Image (cartoon, helix red, strand yellow):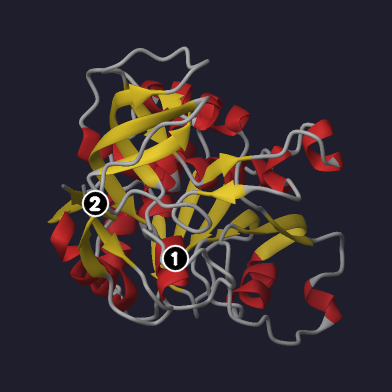
Amino acid sequence: MRAMVLRRPRERLHPEERPEPAAGPGQIRVRIEACGVCRTDLHVVDGDLKDPKLPIVPGHEIVGRIEAKGSGVEFDIGERVGVPWLGHTCGHCPYCLSHRENLCDFPLFTGYTRDGGFATHAVADAAYAFRLDESLDPVAAAPLMCAGLIGWRSLKAAGDAATIGIYGFGAAAHIIAQVCRWQGRRVFGFTKPGDKAGQAFARSMGAEWAGGSDEEPPIPLDAAILFAPVGALAPAALAAVKKGGRVVCGGIHMSDIPSFPYRLLWEERSLVSVANLTRADGEEFLALAPRVPVRTTTTPYPLEHANEALDDLRSGRLEGAAVLTP
């Protein structure tokens, strides 16, 4: 198999040839058709997330076909599956026992603490993979595996907000904006100040207004979701939501949130985070996506160009999502 490997944080990925991995009990070996490039991958590569398995193959938005399986696996050889960020949970900690497996004390994460999808093959726990429809385009489906799933969990955390602001209009935002519009919500998009192309993209995805993150929306918001990993956006979003409004931090990493006056939080506003996903989140979203229907905007890259895809994501040159194809 071929893989793009991170040997040390803040270094370029290195191409490697490796033996094909074996699928153990309860596991599947997936021949990868496409793997999305997520901002979380960037945080792993750039050293923002601590203690990754090293060397590590990043990537956790995997779409592929089962090529081999271990004992106890119900999937069939040849079936198409999606492999997400949450790769394994212990099943016995207080969080797992209270149906909050996203907070498991002893998890494994695809592309972070176990090898992921920047490769031609990957091994995954079958119980954490999702069966995918044969009609799906693998490149279009790959961003659903994290941008879609964590976006969906963030939207659920925002509650029944009728007017919702989305800060950072990348892969997750362009998916969830479509879901919001389908649900009848009003969407307001926020980009880097002066990013006219990004604002046009937000409007094309259903935002009725789009502006810079330094601007006020035309009306007070019921809720806001922060996908941009910029801590300074938290007080800005709190200032944009009305009394009782909620601000949801949807990323796994964010720069420090600066001090802000209590009046921004007062009147029962709240600031919350979401972490990882549950398998139930995945089943819900993957059933909903074709009903919307969600249309992803993607830029494909050959597997060997993973570094270029990460560079383009880091610099904000992408609309939608980058996707690697072996």
Amino acid under disc 2: Val
Residue beneath the point at 59% across and 48% down: 108
Helix, strand or loop at disc 1? loop
Residue drawn at 74 percent across, 56 percent down:
245
- Identify the residue under disc 2: 323
In the rendered image, residue 226, in percent from the top left (x then y), is placed at 56, 63
Picture mark count:
2
- Dot 2 or dot 1: first in sequence order is 1
**Residue 206 vs residue 113: left or right?**
left
Question: Are circles 2 and 1 on residues that touch, CB within 8 Å?
Answer: no
- Farthest residue to the bottom: give it: 259
Q: Image point 36% across, 58% down: which residue?
A: 57
The 10 Å Cα crowd at callout 1, few under 14, some 14 to 19, many 20 or more, is many
Q: Where's residue 26, x and y in %?
A: 52, 25
Of tags 2 and 1, the one toward the viewer is 2
Q: Is residue 121 above or below residue 166?
A: above
Horizontal arrangement in the rendering, residue 64 relative to residue 179 (left or right): left
Quick one: 44 or 263, which is closer to the camera? 44
- x and y, in percent, of residue 189 in the image: 44, 60
Q: Amino acid at mark 1?
A: Gly
Does 161 sit left or right of 65 as displayed?
right
Q: Which mark is residue 168?
A: 1
Q: Which residue is at the front of the view, 271 or 313?
A: 313
